Amino acid sequence: MNNKKHRREPLTDTQLLMTIAICTFVVMYVLAMIVFKGGFLHVQQIFDMLNDNAPLIIVSCGLTIVMIGGGIDISVGAVTSLVAMSCALYLNKGGNIVISALIAIGIGLAFGLVQGYLISYLEIQPFIITLAGMFLARGLTTILSVNPQKVEHEGFKALMNANQNSIKIPWLGYTAKNGNLIPASLELGVVVALSCVLLIFLLLKFHKLGRGFYAIGGNQTSALMLGINVKLTRFFSYVISGLLSGIAGYVLLMHSGAGNATNAAGMEMNAIASAIIGGTLLTGGVGNVIGTFFGTLILTTINKIVVASPLNAPWWQKITTGGMLCVFILLQSIILSIRSKKKKDSKGKENKEEKA
């Protein structure tokens, strides 16, 4: 008979950091409800956060995979803008909606394939390659049009209308001051974003490729010894990131109805911030797309709180976001350092017991 007590397995670094992100969002939003009340008391506030940030959530999913694998991709925002502008111009020339969606996917994949090959097989620094990709995408977007291009395609307008009115939930709505019931509504783009979160979660959790991302990000030498094709795995991380950037560009076009050289400006920085706040380490090997999703919500909640507070000047949003990012990076470092020390002490005690 085994007299050893069953010990509960401790949370992994990924699970712990994800839990911290989720708890931070819940606490932050509850405090906002108590202090500011107003829109924070309505479910539509959270729905609006999702509606406005569906493209960012999609892009952040791709960037999370790249960062888990120990890489970085700062071209995602510019690629998203290029996709939106290209599809807008194509549709305004009488193009087909299905083909416009394929163009979006094609542009995203093209950037992912080229950048992934240069980084994985030619072993050029990811920052340099994706920086070049960012400048290329921005330049191409400006060449296509300096001015915003509003989509006039009737079929796409119908798609936009369906996107904005696709999901209405009356019992989660609220009563306006004039007495009218305003039902809570979610856009179709949010469904696409949540589907991406779910698919990437399943990929990272259960698929061999997903486990490969963690392996190469944690220790490339160990990954090679385990028989993982490091170059191919890293290549796929950039391909997936490019593909999701293309999808995000089309979702952005459905939401805004126009292609604009600046409508996704800074998205790559917000995506990196979302991933870090959600528990993804820049050094690789640790991260979770669910945490990244809540990281995006944390960033959005910060902006909403700043707007609702007396400090509602635009620069305060950037200052607060930067401060929150620093806090999370410091918190991650402290937590992981403490856990690493405990693991070493535990191993040391086990070795001493074995010798004794």
Image: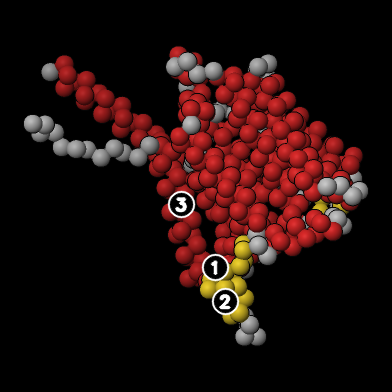
Q: Is residue 222 above or below residue 301?
A: above
Q: Residue at coordinates 38% horizontally, 37% vertically from top-left?
A: 12
Read off the residue under disc 3: 22
- Mark earlier in primary sequence (1, 2): 1
- Mark earlier in primary sequence (3, 1): 3
Q: On the rendered structure, is 120 left or right of 4?
A: right
* Three-letter amino acid code of the residue under disc 3: Ile
Element type at marker 1? helix
Q: Find residue 221 and report its horizontal and vertical position in percent.
A: 48, 16
Q: Quadrant of residue 275?
A: top right
Q: On the rendered structure, is 105 left or right of 301?
A: right
Asked if the residues shown at circle 3 and circle 1 are in contact, with their CB atoms under 8 angstroms apart, the answer is: no
**Residue 219 shows up from this direction:** yes
Q: Quadrant of residue 292?
A: top right
* Three-letter amino acid code of the residue under disc 1: Val
The Cα atoms of the two marked residues, 2 and 3, are separated by: 26 Å
Q: Residue at coordinates 47% horizontally, 65% vertically from top-left?
A: 31
Furthest residue in direction left, as rendered: 1
Q: Find residue 105 and report its horizontal and vertical position in percent.
A: 73, 38
Label 2 neighbour load within 10 Å: few <14, some 14-19, many 20+: some
Circle nearer the viewer, 3 or 1? 1
Read off the residue under disc 2: 174
Read off the residue under disc 1: 43
Quadrant the C terminus occupies:
top left
Q: Find residue 179 and report its horizontal and vertical position in percent.
A: 62, 85
Asked if the residues shown at circle 1 and circle 2 are in contact, with their CB atoms under 8 angstroms apart, the answer is: yes
Element type at marker 2? strand
Which of the pair 175/123 is nearer the observer? Answer: 175
Q: Is residue 240 above or below residue 147?
A: above
Which of the pair 106/356 is nearer the observer? Answer: 106
Q: Residue at coordinates 41% horizontally, 41% vertically from top-left?
A: 15
